[in-house]
Image (cartoon, grey):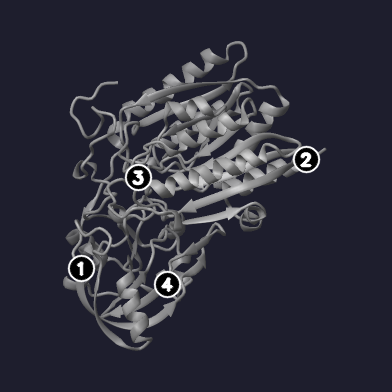
Amino acid sequence: MPRRVLIAELKQETATFNPAPTVYDDFRVYCDGDVLDKYRGTKTELAGAIDVFKAAGIEPVPTMAAHAVSGGPIETASLDRLLDEMVERIRRGVQIDGVEAVYLCLHGAMAGEQEVDPEGRLLRDVRDVVFEMPLVASLDLHAILTERMIAAADVLVPFHTYPHVDQYETGQRAARCLLKLLDGGARPKTIRLPLPMLVRGDELITRTGRFGEAIRRCQQVEADPRGLAAGVIIGNAFTDVPDLQSNVLITVDDADGAYAFARHEADAIARFMWDNRALFQARLTSLDDALRLADETTGLTVFSDAADATASGASGDSNAILGGLLHQPFAGTSLVPIVDAPAVDAAVEAGVGATIDTTLGGTRDAGRFRPLPVVARVVSLHDGLFAYEDGTEGNAGGVAVLQIGMCTVMATRRPVYVVGRAVFEAHGLNPRDFDVVVVKSPNGFRTWYESVAARIVPVDVPGSTSANLRSLPYQHCVRPIFPLDENVEW
């Protein structure tokens, strides 16, 4: 009889300050064999885990994979449906002969309209189904870590890179960890040290920033024979729920001396993070200064609109930078993405080559952005189906490329990740052909743009995912917390 492991995925990063709710239809849902077909050959956690299991002679049994672009809180009925469907599929899966364990691929920073800990709820419900079977989950390092998650899972395995380029490798790490539980008899013991701090900024870039030193120590812990998983989970600063803060998390095999080793390492990593907390804050540039810098630059300038980052859960309909480019006016060419379904509809009705009077922006987060009147020429229309750099599918729900003077706008019906260049290139737009390109990402875009950009400017504009954390209306996170409060102690 073949040995088998159940695999499943549920991922969405929630920005609770985004008023546009996430619903079931926003999720890309695959079931059973479609999971293997869709993830085969991708650079994802599931693909990494599947390859490790197969190499070990273990058959991965797919159950369900559901993934949505980051966005607002998940509607209650939609979240209940997703969780219930996944638990039911896992319930059926554990009845299959030879199933010995479960691997869950999670983001970790989901939030519902009412449920503040969806992943903890899922892990608890799965634990109730699988009983004593090993249960391992991988997490984004922006996860919101809760006691319910730690209690239900045997091991939680977080990313080690920011920008995230180790999704495939994290899936491999999680799978190898699960094999240690199955074949090596490892007995996991977890230490969690919470840190009352919210962090942003370039020093979190693990390749070049101070945060990388903490991660490299975590990797040394995992390399130790006693280590199973280690990471610094910094949370998504825009998921305003009661457990939002940073954490050091280490899981070791409970052998002689392992707990003392883990405690020593966790203390040292946590102290390092706390002592460097002032460095982990973003440095932003005003829009006027950003435009001036772009004017002075020869070559491509990338504007990071982290405040409206669809990669962090924002609405994507900010027209703050667009308005600045049009009204300054900026002398060069620019490329700006925006989520605006009515504008796409107007462009489709008018047709390619037509000129339309429309508005852009303010259709999803009307409390922050007012529609901006424009006269635009419809350059091209697209169905919005494309592939991201990691091989997974994107669906913008329809795309209209519009020309407004020297500014090219890529308007989408639905939010998509505007992190890499593929989202533009799939719609006939090469970022390298412009003087300014706006990305909706705080730092993840660097993987794709540092090699082609002459200058990168993080712009200080309004939005539900602003790195100017004091500009956001926190109500639920751990308090006091740095940098929102003064004289925070740890």
Q: For this rendering, which residue is in front, 197 or 186?
A: 186
**Residue appearing at x 59%, y 24% in the figure:** 227
Image quadrant holding the N terminus, namely top right
> Can you tell which mark lies on residue 202?
3
Residue type at mark 2: give it.
Gly
- CA neighbours of label 2 inside 10 A, class few (<14), some (14 to 19), many (20+): few
First of labels 4, 1 by sequence position: 1
**Residue appearing at x 37%, y 81% in the figure:** 348
Q: Which residue is mark 4?
A: 398
Q: Which residue is mark 2?
A: 57
Q: Is residue 47 above or below residue 428?
A: above
Q: For this rendering, which residue is in front, 345 or 423?
A: 345
Can you give x and y, in whole percent of width and height, for residue 23 in the image?
40, 54
Instruction: Tell me if label 2 and label 4 are in contact, CB under 8 Å.
Output: no
Image quadrant holding the C terminus, namely top left
Can you give x and y, in whole percent of width and height, for residue 442 in the image?
35, 51
Asked where in the image residue 2 lies, by quadrant, the reply is top right
Judge from the rendering whether residue 151 lies leftward or rightward of residue 436; answer left or right: right
Q: Nearer the viewer, mark 3 or mark 2?
A: 2
